[in-house]
Amino acid sequence: MYGRSIGAGVLWMTLAGCGAAPPPEPAGPSVPPSSAPPSSAPAPAGDAAQGAQPAPGASAQAAPASPFIPVARAPFDEVRLLPIEGAVLLAGGVNVRDEADDWWGYPLGVLLPDGTIEVQKSLRLPSGLRQVAGAVGRWPDVIDAIATGDTGRTGIAELWTLGPRGWQQRHEKHGNSFVGLAKIGASVVALQAPVMAPFHESQFVAVRGPNPGLKLTPSVKKECLIEGWDHAIQRTAVLPVAVGSTGDGKVLGYGRSCAGDPSLELWQPGARTSTILRLDRAKRGDHQSASPQVLAGAANDAWIFDGFVSRFDGAAWKEVEGPKLEAGVTDAAVAGDGTLWVLSDGAVFARRGDTWEHTPLPEGVKAHDLATASDGTLWIAAGGALLRHGKPGERSGAPGGSTVPLDKAPGPAPMSQQRRLVRPGGPACPRNVVVLYTFSKVTPDDYDFPLTRKALKGHTELASARFAVTRDGGQRFFAALVPSFDMGQKLAALIRKEVQGSSPNVVCAEPEILRELKLDLTSGEVMK
C-alpha cells in the first residue's frame, strides 16, 4: 500500500470553506491542541464471529489466544501507520506544539522491523495544519510524502521530500487535496482532487519518475450541472476519493459520480484515457469509511473500501459481503501472500479465499489502524500501543523484554470524531451539512453570527434547516444541517451572495453538535 486516501484529516468542514468572521479578525483555523500464520486457528467470521454458541466441549469462559504481540508504545496520540520499504511511518492524528524548542507542526516517527521507534526532529513536517495521506521510498533513504494542508478556508494538496536537509516542499495546490498514490511502471503518481467539485479539476501529479499523462474522463454538463451555484459543473465524471493500481499496471480511481453513485475509473496499462465502471450495490447499509482505499491484490486484482467492501477482478467490479453486516470496514491492508486484513468495529478479520476469519486481539483491546510492512509483517495500532502479528509459538514482546501496557480501549471513535475525508454533499448523502463559518481563536463562545442571520432574514423556505455550532478535531464551526441536498445548495448560494468574503459549501458528514441556534427566519433573530 502506497498511501491512504485522506483529504484533510482533522477537518472535514474546514476544507469545505467557511463564512465571514467577526471583526477584527477573520475566521480561521484554531490550532488543535503480517502475513505470518496465527499461533492458534482463528474462529470463522459470520455466526461464530458474532456471538454464536461455542462448540461442544469448549469452555464458554475461555477466550482464544491472540497472535498479536504488544511491541511498543505509540509515540503520539491517534497514530496512523503508513508502510514504506524497510519501515513503517508513524503519523500523528493532529498537529502538536513543542514548547521546549518553540516548534509547532505535524509529527512523524519511524517504526523499524525490530519494534524500535525513531522520533527525530528531522522527521517533523514544518508548521501548518496538515495530515499525511501516503508515502513512498526506502528508509533511511529519500522519502516522498503527500499531505493535505489547510488554510482555514480551503485545502492545500502538498508534496514533500525528506532528504539530508529535512523536508522540502515540491508541490502545493490550494483548493485541492491528495487522495492517494498509484504505481505505474517506474513511476509513482498522486491523484489530486478538488475539495469541492465545481471550483477545481482533478489531476495526476508525478511523485517519482516521469508523469504518464493520465487524463480523467470529463463530465457531461447535463449530468453534472450543480444548480444554485451559478450553474457550475463537476468537471470530471467521477470525483475521486481514492486511487491505487494493480500488479499488471492498471490504475483505478474510486469516487462518486455526479449523482452520488459509487464509481470506478479505470486506466488500462499504457492508456492515457479512462473508462467508467458503475457499481450495482447490494443494500447492506451505508457504512462510510474514515479513509477510502484502493489496494492492489495478490494477483492482478484490487480491493476497494469505503465502509463497504468491493473487488475488482481485472475486468469487472462487484461488492463483497463484509465480515460484519452490522458494521462497515474502517481500514484494510493486503499481505504479500494475498491475505486481506481488515478492521471492522475495532476487530481484526482476515480473508483467505472466499471466507472471513476473526483474529482475536488481546482481551479488551480494540484496534483503530493496521498496515502490512514491506517484509510482510502485520502491524496493529490499538489501545495506545503497537502490536505485531507473531509467528507460531512466539511470546516475546518489546525489545529488551520490557512490558508494553495495553489500554482497554472502548473501540473506534464515533465517525463524527474520526479523521475523515472531505466528502461533497449529494442526493445520496444521508446527512448534508452546509458549513457557514469557522471559529477563530478570538470568536466568542456565544457569538450569534449577525451577518449570516441578516442574509437569512425573510427566507422562510429554509425553515426546516437546523442551525448549530459544531466541532470536529478540536475545531468549531457554525453549520446548517439540511433535509436535502437541494436545500443545501440553495442555502450555500444565498450566503455566498449576501455575505461578502464567505465561501460556504455543502458536505456530507455527521458533525458533533455543541450548541443549537433556533432562528426565526422571518426576523433573522435568535429565538430565546
Image (cartoon, helix red, strand yellow):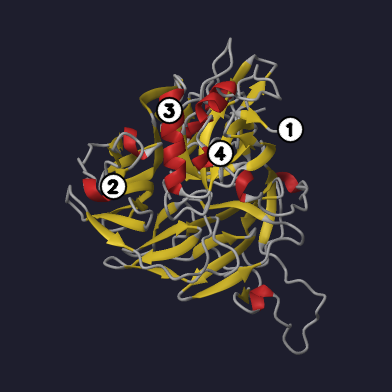
Secondary structure, mark 4, is: strand
The residue closer to the viewer here, 144 or 507, is 507
SS under mark 3: helix
Real-space Cα separation, disc 4 to disc 3, in angstroms: 14 Å
Near mark 1 (Cα within 10 A), the count class, few <14, some 14-19 or many ≥20, is few
In the rendered image, which residue does mark 1 sit on?
528
Sequence order check: which comes first, mark 1 or mark 3? 3
Q: Mark 3: give few (<14), some (14-19) or many (20+) Cα within 10 Å.
A: many
Which residue, given by chain and number where applicable, does mark 3 sit on?
A: 496
Q: Is residue 146 visible?
A: no
How packed is label 4: few (under 14 Cα within 10 Å), some, or many (20 or more)? many
Q: Can residue 459 be seen at all in this image of the molecule?
A: yes
For the residues marked 2 and 3, what is the alpha-carbon distance in whole angstroms?
21 Å
Residue 173 in picture, x, y percent from top left: 36, 27
Residue for point 36% across, 47% down = 240
Mark 2–mark 4 CB contact (< 8 Å) = no
What is the three-letter code of the residue carrying label 2?
Cys
The picture places residue 93, in percent across and down from the top left corner, at 60, 37
477 vs 190, left or right, is right
Which residue in the structure is indicated by mark 2? Answer: 224
Residue count near mark 2 (Cα–Cα under 10 Å), binned few <14, some 14–19, many ≥20: many
Task: Look at the picture and state if 40 lies above or below 197.
Answer: below
Q: Along the horizontal axis of the image, is 218 left or right of 398?
A: left
Tag 4: amino acid: Ala
